[in-house]
Amino acid sequence: MVATISRGRKAHLQHESQLSQAISRLTTLRHELCSAVDSDAESYKAVMKAYKMAKDSSGGRREINAALRRAASVPLGVAEMAAEVAGIAFVLQPITGPSMNPDLATAIALARAAFEGSLTNVRVTLDLIKPDSRKEQSFVSETRKRAEALNVRA
């Protein structure tokens, strides 16, 4: 909204390109984040199903780990997108009017909340994986590294 309102205004014409890029990227991120809500719900259902099936199957741990890998991947993607949203909001602060600062501050706060909640979800889910192969050990290790490398500007 901030970029859309600011774009085309005389006071912000020198930032037209940045504003247009922000609008385009934020629109894409909005759609991807909305889709991630459904993906996260589906991955949770898959984990619950795997735990139920494990009671009746000798390969249950493998199924549980596979479901948990997916359940960790979705919120990691959300954290990456939330960090990007916050970064774009920071970039918009100096190139939009002061009256837009409350909206940008809210966007940053919400992005941080999504970021922190998603990373907590990733950590908890990774702790549930019981690696029984090098592939699973590698997945847990690499996913932890990706999560730790993420940052939202303060």
Image (cartoon, helix red, strand yellow):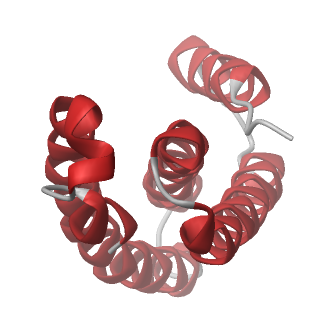
Q: Nearer the viewer, residue 34 or 49?
A: 34
The quadrant holding residue 115 is: bottom right
Please tell me which residue is depicted at 47% across the width and 41% down the height of the picture: 95
Please tell me which residue is depicted at 77% across the width and 36% down the height of the picture: 153
Q: How many marks?
A: 0
Q: Position of residue 49 (x, y in %)?
A: 44, 84
| Left or right of 71 in this view: 153 | right
Please tell me which residue is depicted at 47% across the width and 70% down the height of the picture: 57
Q: Position of residue 27 (x, y in %)?
A: 19, 62
Vertical comparison of 84 with 133: above or below: below
Quadrant in which the C terminus appears = top right
Q: Nearer the viewer, residue 9 or 46?
A: 9
Q: Position of residue 97 (x, y in %)?
A: 51, 59
Vertical comparison of 91 with 98: above or below: above
| Left or right of 99 in this view: 20 | left
Evaluate whether residue 18 shows in this view: no
Please tell me which residue is depicted at 32% across the width and 75% down the height of the picture: 1
Vertical comparison of 59 with 137: above or below: below
